[in-house]
Amino acid sequence: MGTNLAKYQPLFGLRNWLRLITILAATSGLSITVRYSDAQETQAAATPGSVIAELAKEIENVQPFVAGAWTKKWISEVAQLDKVQPKKIKIKEREILVDESLFYSGRYGSPLTYARAFDLAEKHGFAPDTGAKVFDFGYGSIGHLRMLAQMGLDVTGVDVDPLLPNMYTNSSGPYKKGRVQLLDGKFPAEEALVQSAGSGYDLFLSKNTLKRGYIHPAREPASPRHVIDLGVTDEKFLEQVASMLKPGGLFVIYNFCPARAPDDKPYIPWADGECPFSKEQLATAGFEVLEYDVVDDKPARELGHLLGWDAPGGMNLETDLFAWYTIVKKKSQ
Ligand SMILES: C[S@@+](CC[C@H](N)C(=O)[O-])C[C@H]1O[C@@H](n2cnc3c(N)ncnc32)[C@H](O)[C@@H]1O
């Protein structure tokens, strides 16, 4: 990514440096891995329960920020997450320490960064009972999915990141009152994933994954790793989403983004957070467009502040944080 994180290292302790990495990762994308694990080499493992205790402190801050009663309940579930014993795993000869921090807040920050997306879904009627189904495209980490399962939901996440199946071994199956299914691979290009994902979903969610800059970059990205290749046309992708949703089911795209680069600087794909699909494409696929490319900078900055992203040495939220969302509903016909 464009920011040189290493330059911050002398200014901070390691803990703060890791925190900054997480903050930046929350708005960005795909190249954070190496730096995270470089920093990890000198990191002490988080004591089991310590990260959950830190996350639990965020409940009081974040609950008043959301409007929906269901989302408030989902937020409170963060305190009930299971403790994680640290372990070391190897990926491509690289040893990675998986502790409670990486397990729940690892690459992309607190599970509570999903609060705004769920609150917007709730505004459009998503306040599900036990057994309702949620699909998270590019889930990134397990915390928010387990919090849904604790409320009795049946949750499926798919992701292509090889860290995740190595970190979350034996994590698919019944969990508390619900179920979590984790799928590994490129969705929906891999047919086996489509089969395993099935259908009957109440919500298809994409946070920080379906960004216009990742799917249809406006300029040449610095690296091919900065592009998300769906492996199918937009039309096929939208047909797939529609076929997975129940009639009346919601498709929610929520994107936090950093500032765009000036034209004479390298392009930042993850800064273009608008919907990658046009209204016409969404309508043709059988969706009613409820809200399209709504600028959500103010609530995003408020949430960023509540989660401490603007703590000393962190972001200037007014200049570094932007957000967009799109919400569509599968027509009942
Ligand atoms: C920027 S991260 C967002 C993670 C998480 N949704 C969040 O907001 O914290 C984008 C995620 O999408 C995943 N991804 C990219 N292309 C994918 C694909 N075709 N199928 C499944 N996952 C994909 C990446 O591995 C990455 O974890």
Image (cartoon, rainbow, N blue to C red):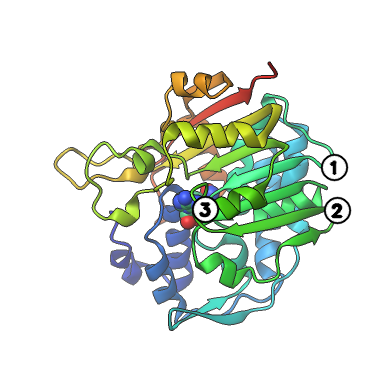
| Res 222 visible | yes
Q: Are marks 1 and 2 in contact (CB under 8 Å)?
A: yes
Seen in the image, is 73 located left or right of residue 250? right
Mark-to-mark CA distance, 2 and 3:
30 Å
Residue at 70%, 19% in the rendered image: 332
Q: Are marks 2 and 3 in contact (CB under 8 Å)?
A: no
Whole-percent x and y of residue 206? 54, 41
Q: Residues within 10 Å of mark 2 (few under 14, many from 20)?
A: some
Q: Is mark 1 within 8 Å of ligand 1?
A: no
Residue at 43%, 79% in the rendered image: 92
Q: Which mark is residue 190?
A: 3
Element class at badge 3? loop
Mark 3: amino acid: Glu
Element class at badge 2? loop
Q: Which residue is mark 2?
A: 177
Q: Which residue is mark 1?
A: 130
Q: Nearer the viewer, mark 1 or mark 3?
A: 3
| Res 118 visible | no
Mark 1: amino acid: Thr
Up the image or down, 129 lies above or below 160; here it is above
**Of 19 and 107, which appears nearest the observer?**
107
Up the image or down, 324 lies above or below 268; here it is above
**Of 62 and 26, which appears nearest the observer?**
26
